């Protein structure tokens, strides 16, 4: 998995946050997508610039990133507020997942 895959997700979430937009999904949607191994597909909804889509077309990169995000989600599931201070905003949760995935994979 490439670090740039995770950072591109973070950039997309950050753009939406800067524009004061709400995520087109909820925390529950995030975890449901993780459980279906479809989180990258959900995250494409915040990809107005096409930077996630560039690497998501590659099945290997997509699968590797999907797994890294799933591992991050499991580390945070049910403990989001305590571990990250995030409890309301799904875009902030995306950022928390990205940071957790980076921490787990790039020590």
Image (spheres, rainbow, N blue to C red):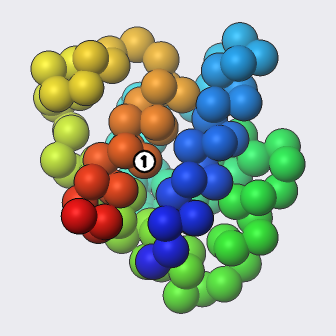
Name the quarter where the N terminus is drawn: bottom left
Asked if residue 68 shows in the view, the reply is yes
Residue plotted at (68% across, 41% down)? 12
Q: Image height check: is 58 above or below 93?
A: below
The answer to whether residue 70 shows anywhere in this view is no
**Looking at the image, which is closer to me, 33 or 5?**
5
Secondary-structure class at tag 1: helix
Instruction: Single out the residue that lies furthest toward the right.
Output: 49
Question: Does residue 95 appear to the left or right of 80 in the view shown?
Answer: right
Foreground residue among 82 and 102 = 102
- Left or right: residue 28 versus residue 48 is left
Q: Which residue occupies 27% across, 54% down? A: 103
User: Residue 78: x, y in percent?
Assistant: 16, 31
Residue underneath mark 1: 98
Residue nearest the observer in this picture, 1 or 21:
1
Label 1 Cα neighbours within 10 Å, binned few <14 / some 14-19 / many ≥20? many
Q: Nearer the viewer, residue 89 or 38?
A: 89
Vertical comparison of 60 with 96: above or below = below
């Amino acid at each position: 998995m490439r670090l740039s895959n995770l950072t591109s997700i973070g950039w997309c979430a950050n753009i939406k946050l800067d524009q004061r937009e709400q995520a087109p999904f909820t925390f529950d949607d995030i975890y449901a997508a993780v459980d279906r191994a479809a989180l990258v597909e959900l995250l494409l909804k915040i990809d107005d610039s096409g930077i996630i889509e560039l690497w998501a077309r590659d099945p290997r990169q997509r699968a590797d990133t999907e797994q890294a995000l799933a591992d991050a989600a499991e580390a945070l599931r049910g403990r989001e507020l305590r571990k990250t201070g995030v409890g309301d905003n799904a875009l902030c949760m995306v950022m928390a997942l990205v940071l957790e995935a980076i921490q787990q994979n790039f020590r």
